[in-house]
Image (cartoon, rainbow, N blue to C red):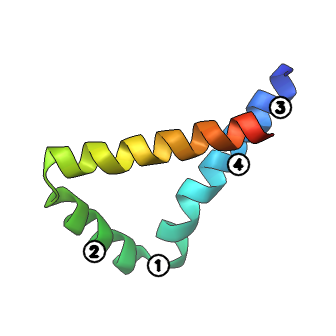
Amino acid sequence: MDSDTLWLALGLVLVFEGLFPFLSPRGWRQMMGRIMQVNDGQLRFFALCSLIAGLLLICLV
């Protein structure tokens, strides 16, 4: 993997992260409010699932 691939991946993450707040700022705020109400254990579980899914995707590619 070269540095161009790393920068491309980072750019795609930033695009996806900015897409929802750009398209629906009110919905994004409501979602963030709900996330703030989730306890730490649940948040860690969803973060772990996301990490595992991302690592599996990277391994498949």
In the rendered structure, find residue 5 and report the number of the disc placed on it.
3
Left or right, 30 with respect to 3, comes to left
Tell me which amino acid carries mark 2. Gln
Q: Earlier in the sequence, mark 1 or mark 2?
A: 1
* Label 4: how many Cα within 10 Å (few below 14, some 14–19, many 20+): few
* Front position in the image: 49 or 39: 49
Classify residue 1 as left or right of residue 7.
Answer: right
Q: Is residue 14 above or below residue 55?
A: below
Q: What distance separates the C-alpha of mark 1 from that of mark 3?
A: 29 Å
Above or below for 18 versus 6: below
Callout 1: SS? loop
Looking at marks 1 and 4 on the same chain, the residue that comes earlier in the sequence is marked by: 4
| Image coordinates for residue 39, horizontal then vertical, percent | 13, 52
Q: Left of 55 or right of it: where is 46?
A: left
Q: In percent of the image, x 70 and y 37: which residue is there? A: 58
User: For the residue marked with disc 1, what is the amino acid?
Assistant: Ser
Q: How packed is label 1: few (under 14 Cα within 10 Å), some, or many (20 or more)?
A: few
- Residue drawn where x is 76% and y is 40% of the image: 60
User: In the image, residue 33 lies at what x, y percent?
Assistant: 21, 66
Q: CA distance from mark 3 to mark 4?
A: 11 Å
Give the quadrant of the C terminus. top right
User: The residue under label 3 is which amino acid type?
Assistant: Thr
Choose the circle earlier in sequence order: 3 or 4.
3
Residue bearing the label numbered 2:
30
Q: CA distance from mark 4 to mark 2?
A: 24 Å
Sooner in the amino-acid sequence: mark 1 or mark 3: 3
Q: Which residue is mark 1?
A: 24
Q: Please, what secondary structure does the residue beneath circle 2 have?
A: helix
Report the residue at 41% width, 74% height from top: 25
Amino acid found under the numbered disc labelled 4: Leu
